[in-house]
Image (tube, rainbow, N blue to C red):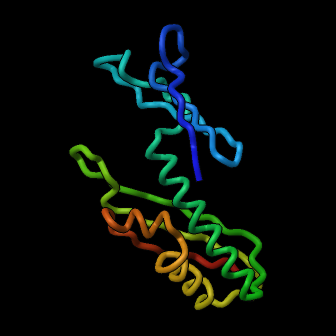
Amino acid sequence: MECTVSWTGGVGAESPMGFIAETGSGHVITMDGAPDAAKPENGGRNLAPRPMETVLAGTGGCTAYDVVLILKRGRHQVERCSVKLTSERAEKDPKVFTKIHLHFTVAGKNIPEAAVERAIALSHETYCSATIMLAKTAVVTTSFELIHL
């Protein structure tokens, strides 16, 4: 896996702290820094997600992918799945994540709660490299809501 991140700032740039990530699979992600009122030249313009927000978003994508795949492999009729991530970070550098909570909402027909609970556990204990990696610095917790259609 590879990715190239390029700074888009500089003289005349829309944001002095903008970046573009080009992934090995050929996709592009834009990122920007938070505005800095004290030193505007060191801050972003809030034109794209912060880099750490993309880490959090990628973690959500990784685990949601697992949960849907595990449920589908179990022949459950999954119609929707979303995960809301909330987090806390250390106050001092490096400002690593210290707490991450993932709340899943799964909707489908005749899906047992135990199947959803098992899919989430398998993701977080075995398959989701993002949450397993982040659990080295953060307390990762989960909850879920099952909507029967």
Residue 2 in picture, x, y percent from top left? 58, 48
Q: At 48% from the left edge and 60% from the top edge, which residue is drawn?
A: 85
Which residue shows up at 48% across the image and 51% down it?
A: 55
Q: Quadrant of residue 141?
A: bottom left
Against 3, residue 9 (above or below) is above
Residue in view at x 48 percent, y 54 percent: 56
Whether residue 149 is visible to the viewer of this picture, yes or no, is no
Q: In this rendering, is residue 56 above or below 28? A: below
In the image: residue 97, left or right of residue 47: left
Measured along the vertical axis of the image, is residue 27 above or below residue 70?
above
Residue 46 in picture, x, y percent from top left = 49, 29
Looking at this rendering, what residue extends furthest in the left direction? 92
**Residue 127 visible, this angle:** yes
Left or right: residue 55 compared with residue 28: left
146 and 50: which one is in front? Answer: 50
Residue 91: % across, % down: 23, 47
Q: Residue at x 52, y 47 (%)?
A: 54
In which quarter of the view is residue 108 placed? Answer: bottom right
Q: Position of residue 124 (x, y in %)?
A: 48, 75
Q: Nearer the viewer, residue 103 or 27?
A: 27
